């Protein structure tokens, strides 16, 4: 080790004394005092001997342990995520009526469960900066962005415009708007022009029956 046991003991002794009466030490510190001068010189000498290479060699036996701990943490995190995925895959889906009573966030989570049961790998986007997509789904090389709308009123033009922009941002193959409601005529017309798939309450009911 780059610091001997004797040097370590001296450091502990000095700092123990120092922290016992810190104010008194600062007030009475006298470089003419042989005791203080000796320990200050010893500490300076020890600190000068510390190099990056010495630190690396000193902690080398611990690297394997640290690496092993990191692997265990990663494995546990993956196991937790995979367990949640299995629970979603094998849990019973909400009914169409329950979909209509959900909050926006609950609706997104329920859609993730629904589409995972249909074989999609589903990623929820962040609450902010999602660029119009609530879910990004992947299956067999195909990418689909989805905007989820748990509304009672018909969905308008804005949702179609947002998911069109999201399709370009995520470089997706398809863009969907899924809702518990219906769509306005303006939204339907824009969706046809933009090649956006509109999944209304009837489509959602069909998805649930097929899952």
Image (tube, rainbow, N blue to C red):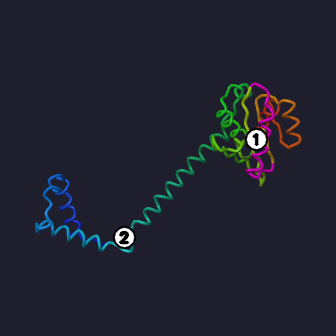
Q: Is residue 143 left or right of residue 128?
A: right
Q: Is residue 103 left or right of residue 63?
A: right
Residue 177 at x, y percent in the picture:
78, 38
Q: Residue at x 19, y 53 (%)?
A: 22
Toward the viewer: 135 or 84? 135
The residue labelled by disc 1 is: 162
Label 2, secondary structure: give it. helix
Is residue 87 shown in magenta?
Answer: no
Q: Is residue 77 above or below residue 150?
A: below
Q: Is residue 20 visible?
A: no
Q: Is residue 109 above or below residue 52?
A: above
Label 1, secondary structure: give it. helix
Q: Residue at x 82, y 37 (%)?
A: 198
Label 1 and label 2: CA atoms lie apart by: 54 Å
Q: Is residue 57 left or right of residue 17?
A: right
Image mark for residue 55:
2
Q: How many neighbours does mark 1 have within 10 angstroms: few (below 14), some (14-19), or many (20 or more)?
A: some
On-image quarter of the N terminus: bottom left
Magenta span covers which residues? 152-173
Residue 70 at x, y percent in the picture:
48, 58
Marked residue nearer the N-terminal end (1 or 2) = 2
On-image quarter of the C terminus: top right
Corner quadrant of residue 102: top right
Toward the viewer: 115 or 147? 147
Which label lies toward us, 1 or 2?
A: 1
Residue 38 at x, y percent in the picture:
15, 70
Q: Is residue 7 above or below residue 125?
A: below
Q: Residue at x 81, y 47 (%)?
A: 174
């Amino acid at each position: 080790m780059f610091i001997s046991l004797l040097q370590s003991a001296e450091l502990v002794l000095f700092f123990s004394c120092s922290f016992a009466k810190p104010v008194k030490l600062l007030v009475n510190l006298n470089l003419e005092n042989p005791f203080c001068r000796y320990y200050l010189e010893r500490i300076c000498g020890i600190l000068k001997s510390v190099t990056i290479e010495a630190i690396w060699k000193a902690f080398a036996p611990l690297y394997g342990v640290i690496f092993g701990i990191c692997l265990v943490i990663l494995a546990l995190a993956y196991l937790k995520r995979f367990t949640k995925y299995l629970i979603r895959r094998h849990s019973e889906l909400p009914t169409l009526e329950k979909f209509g009573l959900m909050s926006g966030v609950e609706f997104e989570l329920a859609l993730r469960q629904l589409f995972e049961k249909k074989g999609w790998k589903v990623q929820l986007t962040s609450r902010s900066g999602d660029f119009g997509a609530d879910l990004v789904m992947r299956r067999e090389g195909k990418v689909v962005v989805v905007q989820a709308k748990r509304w009672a009123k018909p969905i308008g033009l804005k949702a179609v415009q947002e998911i069109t922009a999201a399709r370009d941002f995520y470089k997706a193959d398809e863009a969907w708007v899924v809702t518990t409601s219906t769509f306005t005529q303006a939204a339907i017309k824009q969706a046809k022009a933009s090649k956006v798939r509109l999944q209304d309450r009837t489509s959602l009911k069909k998805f649930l029956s097929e899952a």
